[in-house]
Amino acid sequence: MKPALRKVTDAAMGVFNWADDRLHLTKLWESTAGHHVPQSAGSWFYVFGSATLLCFMIQLATGIMLALVYVPSAAEAYTTLEYLTFEQDLGWFLRAVHYWGSNFMVGIMLLHMTQVFLFGAYKYPREITWLTGVALLGLTLGLAFTGQVMRFDEDAYWGLGIGAAIMGRVPVIGGQMVNFMLGGPIIASEALSRFFALHVFVLPGAVLAIVSIHLRMVLSKGINEYPTPGMVVRRETYDKEYAAILKKEGVPFFPKAISKDLVAGAIVILGILACACFFGPKGPLGPPDPLQIDTVPRPDFYFLWIFAVAALMPDWMETPALLGGPVIIGLVLLALPFFNGTGEKSWRRRPVAVLTVVLTYLSLGLLTYLGQTSPWSPDMNAWRSAPIAKADLEGRSPLELQGALLIQYMQCRNCHAIDGVGGQRGPDLSGVGTRLTKPQLVRQIIQGGGNMPAYGDNLSPDQVEALANYMVSLCPTGIPPARDASLPEQPLGK
Amino acid sequence: MNDQTTKEPCREGSKPCACEGATKKASRRDFLLMLGFGLNAVAGAAIGIPLAGYVLSSFFKTNILDWVPLGPVDSFPEGKTRFANYKNPTHREWDGQTADIPCWVRRITGNDFQVFAINCTHLGCPVRWFEESKLFMCPCHGGAFYEDGGHAAGPPPRGLYTYEVKVENGNLYIKAGDLPNLGNQKV
């Protein structure tokens, strides 16, 4: 080596040694990035944790950028969102990355939790790693909800109304809980400021604190080895077995086990960017103007399943489920490593675990789909916009045609489709004449029941007659009309 | 080190001052330690209680309801239900549009009014009035209410929330100021 180069190298080493002596960099590296993990942990199944953390970092960076412009005031927030989206250079892009980053974060975190569950990584001695992970799931969902409020549009406004209505169901102190949630008596500036503080200070700070504990536990208790069927966790022997695994096949996390995390991380970033570019940011929808009631509020996709549950549950179960459900789910998740902390790890020998995951995803997926399509919601404009097919009008008597007009005019179509067109809340009226007799139809119209309002006070006897006659006529050719079972059967066509 | 000194056994015949001095120092330290804990507990409470009070103030505050005008009685035709709005009595300048609260006014006859909150009693979504079928319908989960606010169909646990009403000098007033919900509406 040339003397000049040697001098430079020596000087650089001197600086490094000086810094290392003060900051203990080598020790820090060895105990973190360089810590040994089982070689089997360098698997594609193990990339979700680092990918979730990466999403959070993207959220932090883009969130700080958005906060440079966003004004958390009920009077200004919507205007600044429009400014961000349409005028601020690359504002739309940052909003889109923040929105898609949150979607990716929730999705990948669920995958991470599923993998941890199926691989038995929550078992001894990693209980606290799991507990902090459950806390991080709760905080992430909190960030998602408060983030929806930050997009202060009509959905955010009425979403807060839904949250307040749920809080109002708390026994005894419901009213106070609503005030506490909103920071005041109505949905206004205090509510937005409160959720802003939660979204940008409290929840991210809590995530950072708990992530540091989570990572500390990952380092001190090690990354779970890839479970092999038949390898059973016992509290008395596991620590020695894990030490033996590390001794036999342990490799430093960097550079021997990080490669797949790097590839997955890059794919996640590119995926978020691609979604941001192709689909753009969400909203803002209409302004948060309470007077604009021509709106159909819907939560973001991660809460659609709750929206669906609120529509499908029996009335008596609603309040206990809305208030107690999240608590019970949280407690079950927190208690998991304590009632199932040892034993078989591999999912191949844990059919109940596999079934739980399959049923959970099926339920969440189905409820989310239902939440998106909301067949229980009336189609508020169907009475004006959903036509009746020509075939359902041809050949009808004037009285029956009057009934067809009334079906539109009285907003029956908001809840009832005909030939699949119209609201889905009630049964499709095509072929209703094959299911109900005229007296049954008259009774149903006048008295309601079975989740239908009674129209007896709003319709004259002539109008009821016309409606019932038209519905009786909705009887496909070749299918006999409904008949009164107490009367003798008539031959078809009479 | 003093700590090590305190751990030395006190032997008979040894100089008494070493042992007693250490004991005195240790007890003074113990006292200071306890004093430190105590003072910090007081200081923590002194800062923590106001902080908690600040955050929880909205929990304990009683909502102030006030009479707000909805307009002249004659602007509401008899036998009809009309959309109306008012400025929330406790609004701030920076509340923007959110200070404007909508409601449904039903004039039965003369000065006999019913004023309903816009919020569905199920989960708070805005109900819409349909004059033809004389029903309020909710776009979220399909709750429906009759023109007198009574529950007609769907998941809402009760009829629409109603405001206290009065007519004064030919104007219609309601007592308003909070977001109606199952926790604060007894009627």
Image (spheres, coloured by chain):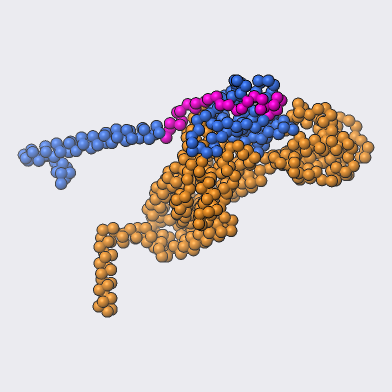
Left/right of residue B14 with respect to residue B101 in the rendered view:
left
Asked whether residue A345 is in view, the answer is no
Is B61 inside the magenta-drawn segment? Answer: yes
The quadrant of the picture occupied by the C terminus of chain B is top right
Q: Which of these two is toward me, A39 or A256?
A: A256
Asked whether residue B43 is in view, the answer is yes
On the image, the x and y values in percent for residue A298 come to: 60, 43
Left/right of residue A97 with respect to residue A414 in the rendered view:
left
Q: Colour of chain A?
A: orange
Q: Is residue A1 above or below residue A116?
A: below
The total number of labels drawn is: 0
On the image, the x and y values in percent for residue A399 come to: 87, 34
Q: Colour of chain B?
A: blue
Left/right of residue A289 with respect to residue B146 in the rendered view:
left
- Residue at image x 61%, y 48%? A365
- Residue at image x 63%, y 46%? A372
Q: Which residues are magenta?
A: B55-81
Left/right of residue A389 with respect to residue A8 in the rendered view:
right
When asked about the image quadrant of residue A465, the answer is: top right
